[in-house]
Amino acid sequence: MMGLKLPKEQKERLVASVQQYFELERSEEIGSIAAEQLLDFMIKEIGPHLYNHAIQDARKTVIERMQSLEDELYALEKPLTAKR
């Protein structure tokens, strides 16, 4: 999996969110560089797990939809009558 590259604005919001978390939950102040490094580390470490989980969810959804589509196709079939 390639590294995740976030748009600048999104990364800035996430860095601010990390800083806010440290301030509110831990009563600690961390700078934007430290918050960005933590964010990059978490993306690197947790990102592949979240990505794989999302792929599994998508696979499950596709299988369910394919089953539904197959059922709908069977319902469209015309009954065959024997000719005499």
Image (cartoon, helix red, strand yellow):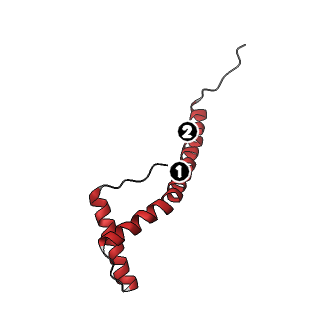
Q: Residue at x 57, y 40 (%)?
A: 66
Q: Secondary structure at mark 2?
A: helix
The residue labelled by disc 2 is 69
Q: Residues within 10 Å of mark 2 (few under 14, many from 20)?
A: few
Q: Residue at x 70, y 15 (%)?
A: 83
Q: Nearer the viewer, mark 1 or mark 2?
A: 1
Q: Secondary structure at mark 1?
A: helix
- Name the spot of residue 31 as percent of width and height, x first: 30, 75
- Name the spot of residue 78 as percent of width and height, x first: 60, 26
- Say which amino acid is labelled 1: Ile
- Name the spot of residue 63 as percent of width and height, x first: 58, 44
Q: Looking at the image, which is closer to me, 72 or 7?
A: 7
Compared with 12, 55 (above or below) is above
Q: Residue at x 60, y 42 (%)?
A: 67
- Name the spot of residue 53 as percent of width and height, x first: 54, 56
Q: Looking at the image, which is closer to me, 35 or 60?
A: 35
As measured in the structure, the alpha-carbon distance from the residue carrying label 1 to the one carrying label 2 is: 21 Å
Mark 1 or mark 2, earlier in chain: 1
Q: What is the quadrant of the C terminus in the image?
A: top right
The residue labelled by disc 1 is 55
- Say which amino acid is labelled 2: Leu
Compared with 57, 69 (above or below) is above
Q: Residues within 10 Å of mark 1 (few under 14, many from 20)?
A: few
Q: Looking at the image, which is closer to me, 14 or 54?
A: 14
Q: Residue at x 48, y 59 (%)?
A: 47
